Image (spheres, rainbow, N blue to C red):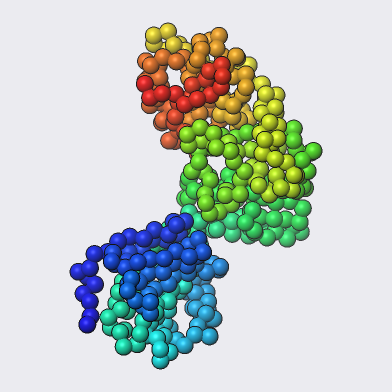
Amino acid sequence: MTTDWKSVDWTTFVHPHNAYRLEFPAHWEHRVEQDGETCGFGPRDRDNVGLWISILPASVDTDRLSEDLPRFFAHAMQKAEAANIREDVTLHHHGLKADMTSPEQGGQYWMIAGGDLVLFGSSQVPPAERDQWNPAFERVMASLVINRDDELLMRKITFEALELLRERHPDQEYEADEKGIRGKNHVLFLYNLWREVLAAPHRLEELVRTYVEAVNPTSHPDLGREEWIDVEDRILPVLKHESYLKTEGPTRHIHTVDWLADVVICYAIRSERSFRFITGWDLDRWEVDPDRLHATAIENLVELSFPERLEGSRQPGGGRLILVTPCDSFGASRLLHPELHDVFRGALGSPFLAAVPSRDTLVLFTNKRSVKKKLLPTIRKDHDKSSYAITPRIFLVTPDGIALAGAG
């Protein structure tokens, strides 16, 4: 008996790490194994019917997709009993399909590439039931969408930068790894470049070229291999929105501390013209615990002076606004300054309010409802247009520290 799969209710499955999503019949069951490396779908009452999808430890160059994917698939099929390898035009992404030829199996194989992922699918079907189950599994595969556009763009950015770096500095023998791009005596961390291109993909070539032209391998020969004693006086805290950190990709290695609401604290080594984030690898290598790192960063923050000239203005109802915008990329970080309340309470009263819409700006203003109501739209606008946005939330600065401000 065949089933009319068009009349069946379908439900959506989202991969635990959002690598892909698909639809499958709502009355089926699904299984997630090895933290999502393999996922299975099939009827609850049959142990010999099912579809398995696995994430392969491989990637393909999208510019050579038509050449690379058949080679990978053919290699995977060498030990399988399969025939009739062909492109599956029903898929959302470029993919190939083959028929199982084993006397005991009537299912199919798939290989699909999308973003920076390669997926391998296989269906288990008794040969006598091909007509009943294969249409269902084909529809499941046709619904599969890989959610890796950002990751694909990051791979392209890395590849473009790597090619240019090899042309300009062949002696460095650059290679890409999960940290970034590694030369003979330094590592280039690409977090800021990735962020800039993700915000303006149409400027990819321009931004990559500008980044590469600024690289001087001899100016920071120990980048990525610094010793604690050489950098401890240059470590500073950096506020970031939690969305900056991805569960997949290089930013997952950045060492962070949860702070308030959706804001986290990262730590950076400051250099003359740039800074790089500190990773868990750095802490392990230095044998430095997180508390010591944080204390060191705050001590260094205290050494940063507030700008001598601060932009300020009177607000309706007797309120005041002060903008702290130093030219050092650590304006927002000064919200963590332990003397912030003491420095500004004379001008703003106590407690007062603060906002960090972007990396370079700390907004301080009187704790009055009318002032807050007037400034909120401007703060949100500044946040939304910034390439280094943090949060549009408002914070309360008190003698005892920083807290989230109420909604009123």
Q: Is residue 16 above or below residue 303?
A: below
Residue 394, percent across and down?
45, 26
Residue 310 in sight: no
Residue at the far bottom: name it.
Answer: 103
Q: Is residue 51 above or below residue 400?
A: below
Nearer to me, 70 or 67: 70
| Residue at 56%, 19% in the rendered image | 400
Residue 395 in sight: yes
Q: Tell me the quarter of the image containing the N terminus.
A: bottom left
Q: Quadrant of residue 138?
A: bottom left
In the picture, measured across the screen, residue 12 lies left or right of residue 358, that is left
Q: Quadrant of residue 166?
A: bottom right
In the picture, measured across the screen, residue 71 lies left or right of residue 230, that is left
| Residue at 57%, 49% in the rendered image | 252
| Residue at 61%, 49% in the rendered image | 253
In the picture, measured across the screen, residue 86 lies left or right of residue 267, that is left
Residue 206, percent across and down?
55, 49
Residue at the far front: name it.
Answer: 45
How many dots with numbers?
A: 0
Q: Quadrant of residue 295?
A: top right
Q: Is residue 103 above or below residue 42?
A: below
Q: Tell me the quarter of the image containing the C terminus.
A: top left
Residue 71, percent across and down?
53, 79
Residue 199, percent across and down?
48, 45
| Residue at 41%, 23% in the rendered image | 406
